[in-house]
Amino acid sequence: MSTVINTARFQSVKVQPDKVFSFPQGLIGFESHRDFVLIERNNQSQFSWLQSLSKPDLCFLVIEPSKVLGAFEPEISSEDKMSLETKNGDGISFLSLVSVDESHQNIFVNLKSPIAINNAKKIGRQIILEDDQYPVRFKI
């Protein structure tokens, strides 16, 4: 059974329970907000929105890092794998937070701390990669 949530950006949105992701630790800086839904407003856009269910004005622009880089296969820690309830990392997908500078001319993707999602269990966790290969601000 779907639920309707009110959002600051999209007004009322109908949410199916199987589309809700739980973030037991929240996101960095937003630890008290634990349930989110991924909203895709335009099927042709590469971008989506990660909308909080508990705070109508908390919404993040996100993109799959593979759409920016091609291959995105970071090594994640055993603690992160355990938190996502996966042993070998299979079934994990990634999202990266997107930011736009003040001039609205430059778009950046945070590849250093992606959001890892276990799609089967609907559990997410923002992780910080140890590898310096991925920057915090990757310009697209």
Image (cartoon, rainbow, N blue to C red):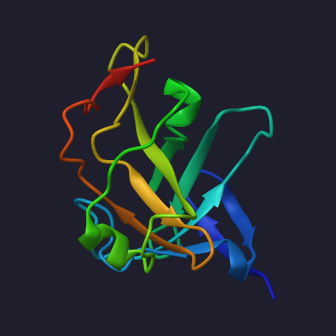
Q: Quadrant of residue 6?
A: bottom right
Q: Is residue 93 above or below residue 125?
A: above
The one nearer the camera, 61 or 56, is 61
The one nearer the camera, 125 or 75, is 75
Q: Is residue 69 left or right of residue 39?
A: left
Q: Is residue 21 above or below residue 75?
A: below
Quadrant where the N terminus lies? bottom right
Q: Position of residue 18 (x, y in %)?
A: 71, 78
Farthest residue in the bottom direction? 1
Q: Is residue 82 left or right of residue 12?
A: left
Farthest residue in the front direction? 88
Mark count: 0
Q: Is residue 90 left or right of residue 76?
A: right
The residue depicted at 43 percent of the width and 11 percent of the height is: 105
Q: Position of residue 12 (x, y in %)?
A: 71, 65
Q: Is residue 38 left or right of residue 76?
A: right
Q: Position of residue 2 (x, y in %)?
A: 78, 82
Q: Is residue 85 above or below residue 112?
A: below
The one nearer the camera, 67 or 55, is 67
The residue depicted at 55 percent of the width and 27 percent of the height is: 70
* Res 6 seen here: yes
Q: Quadrant of residue 20?
A: bottom right
Q: Position of residue 116 (x, y in %)?
A: 43, 59
The residue depicted at 37 percent of the width and 48 percent of the height is: 114
